[in-house]
Image: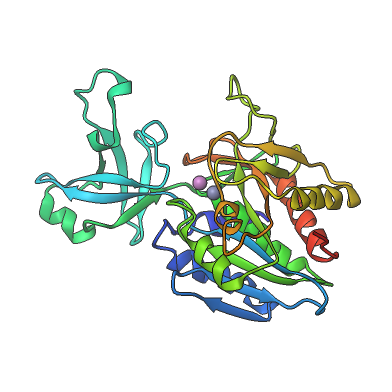
């Protein structure tokens, strides 16, 4: 798991620029599936055939990550930027970012701002070490997107890195693809684009696949750090079965099925109510006439920072849960 997670979290792929991460994911799992397709939006769809009697299941993990998009380059070579997805001031100040071409920079803010609360993204900038506009434009253009620079680290059975949201989910799908033996159901593993800017890739891919059931795999927040927002999810207490977030109320039968399968294999699991946020299930369940959908979430601390933290056992148990779901009959 560690090598895979390292490869996935360190590969560039902000929303709208998923080519590299898509290539890495395809390379990892293409030998294990029956068909692979890349659609107009850039979603990577891997199909694994069932035994002909099961349901059509769409499993979706978004492969895009949040980023900083260059909006302006000043005379001194400093880059102004806007957000692609949930980039916050606090998570970005004086951090390091990297562009697709490997150019690195420090993100800082106008020093005259006295109160930290007055710092907004439009009063921040990226310093790529250029001495003027000309030098800067040789390396970076308006519209280029940087992501947090964050090599993977391990500490006490936990992984710390950037883009755990949602490369951890991508890792779960890849492992599931590899470990599936007797797949009862027709499984479409979709590595979606542009989730972080509004669940866009899931929308078109769910329409095309038209599944009987949708399962999103993504990270979720936890409530287990000092004075955290109240939330029942803890790191290391098992994959979370989603009841609700800001984008979806999960279909009760899908949620119950997940609970049953988790109990069948006797893994720890927890129930997730996320009072904000969203995931691909939000788009899938509203497709066509409606598609019963749910989500398996990986507990993750410090979501949308450069140092998101997940627990190895949660990942392993998440894979077991997905495999068990796919290898058994799905009754809805
Ligand atoms: Co996110
Ligand atoms: Zn996510």
The residue drawn where x is 35% and y is 52% is 146
Relative to 41, is 104 on the left or the right? left
Nearest the viewer among 33 and 254 is 254
Q: Quadrant of residue 173?
A: bottom right
Residue 221, given in percent of the width and then of the height, sits at 60, 37
Q: Is residue 158 visible?
A: no
Residue at the front extreme, as displayed: 289
Residue 208 location, quadrant: bottom right
Q: In x, y percent, where is residue 124?
A: 26, 36
Residue 162 in the image, given as x and y percentages of width and height:
50, 46
Residue found farthest to the left: 75
Please indicate whether residue 22 sits to the left or right of residue 299 in the image.
Answer: left
- Where is the N terminus found, in terms of image quarters? bottom right
Q: Going 80% across and 48% down the picture, which residue do you hit?
A: 256
Q: Residue at x 23, y 34 (%)?
A: 123
Quarter of the picture containing the C terminus is bottom right
């Amino acid at each position: 798991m560690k090598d895979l997670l390292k490869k996935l979290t360190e590969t560039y792929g902000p929303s709208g620029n998923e080519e590299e991460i898509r290539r890495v994911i395809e390379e990892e799992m293409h030998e294990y599936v029956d068909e692979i397709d890349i659609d107009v939006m850039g979603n990577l769809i891997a199909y694994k055939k069932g035994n002909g009697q099961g349901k059509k299941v769409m499993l979706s993990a978004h492969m895009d990550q949040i980023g900083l998009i260059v909006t302006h380059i000043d005379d001194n070579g400093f880059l102004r930027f806007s957000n692609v997805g949930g980039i916050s001031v606090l998570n970005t100040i004086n951090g390091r970012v990297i562009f697709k071409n490997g150019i690195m920079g420090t993100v800082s803010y106008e020093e005259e701002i006295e109160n930290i609360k007055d710092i907004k993204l439009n009063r921040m900038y990226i310093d790529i070490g250029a001495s003027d506009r000309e030098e800067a434009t040789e390396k970076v253009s308006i519209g280029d997107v940087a992501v947090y620079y964050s090599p993977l680290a391990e500490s006490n059975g936990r992984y710390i890195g950037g883009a755990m949201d949602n490369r951890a989910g991508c890792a779960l799908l890849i492992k599931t693809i590899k470990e599936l033996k007797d797949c009862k159901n027709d499984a479409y593993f979709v590595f979606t684009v542009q989730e972080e800017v509004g669940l866009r890739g899931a929308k078109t891919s769910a329409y095309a696949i038209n599944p009987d059931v949708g399962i999103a795999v993504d990270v979720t927040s936890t409530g287990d750090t000092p004075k955290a927002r109240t939330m029942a999810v803890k790191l290391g207490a098992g994959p979370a079965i989603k009841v609700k977030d800001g984008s979806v109320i999960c279909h009760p039968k899908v949620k119950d099925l997940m609970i049953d399968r988790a109990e069948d294999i006797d893994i720890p699991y927890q129930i997730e109510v996320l009072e904000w946020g969203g995931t691909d299930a939000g788009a899938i369940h509203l497709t066509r006439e409606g598609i019963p959908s749910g989500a398996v979430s990986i507990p993750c601390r410090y979501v949308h920072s450069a140092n998101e933290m997940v627990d190895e056992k949660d990942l392993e148990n998440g894979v077991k849960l997905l495999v068990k779901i796919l290898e058994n009959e799905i009754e809805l």
